[in-house]
Amino acid sequence: MISLIAAIGKNNELGKDNQLVFHIKEDMRFFRETTTGHPILMGRKTFESIGRPLPNRTNYVITRHPEDLPDGVEPVGDLRQFLESWQDSKEELFVIGGATIYEAALPYATTLYLTEVNATVSDADTFFPNFDKSLYTKTLIKKGSENDLVYSIIKYIKN
């Protein structure tokens, strides 16, 4: 099973200059609680922006240079093959970014966990891919506000 998890703005904004554009403590807590104990998959730039393997998770990083990864990180060379091998697994794999990885993984994903922030970021340079919401069942997990940002944590399950 493959799931995507992200915080996005009204225009699907994800990041700017390899950093997240939204910093919401409740979203970070939700991310940590949801992904802990599960494998995570990310691109090399996302891994570099985090700066270390995330604890209590198997960290898979897509890279052409596995020798550059620290111990405790599993390199992935062929993204499509990796996603196909996880597609029928009962273990949930979380894709955590970046935009290119989200776009490649979206067709394989059965679940999307999106913190939808009611805000726009005009200078964002990274975006979550568009997807047809009519193909999913939407469940509200939590609503809240923090630092003048109103958000909803939503779970989308593919029909």
Image (spheres, grey):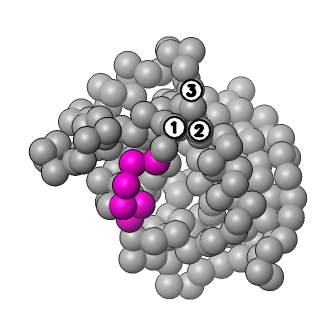
Residue under label 2, please give it. Answer: 36
Q: Is residue 71 left or right of residue 118?
A: left
First in sequence: mark 2 vs mark 1: 2
Q: Quadrant of the N terminus?
A: top right
Q: CA distance from mark 2 to mark 1?
A: 6 Å
Q: CA distance from mark 1 to mark 3?
A: 14 Å
Q: Is residue 53 left or right of residue 114?
A: left
Nearer the observer: mark 1 or 3; the answer is 1
Amino acid carrying mark 2 in the image: Thr
Residue at figure coordinates x 29%, y 35% from the top left: 74
Which span of residues is magenta-colored? 49-54
CA neighbours of label 2 inside 10 A, class few (<14), some (14 to 19), many (20+): some
Amino acid carrying mark 3 in the image: Glu
Residue at figure coordinates x 78%, y 35% from the top left: 137
Mark 3 falls on what kind of element?
Answer: loop
Q: Percent x, y for residue 108?
A: 49, 30
Residue under label 1, please give it. Answer: 56
Mark drawn on residue 141: none
Q: Residue 34's quadrant in the figure?
A: top right
Residue under label 3, please give it. Answer: 92
Q: Is residue 47 above or below residue 151?
A: above
Q: Is residue 11 above or below residue 107?
A: below
Q: Quadrant of the C terminus?
A: top right
Amino acid carrying mark 1 in the image: Asn
Q: Is residue 50 left or right of residue 14?
A: left
Q: Percent x, y for residue 65?
A: 14, 47
CA neighbours of label 3 inside 10 A, class few (<14), some (14 to 19), many (20+): some
Q: Residue 21's quadrant in the figure?
A: bottom right
Q: Is residue 13 above or below residue 113?
A: below
Q: How many marks?
A: 3
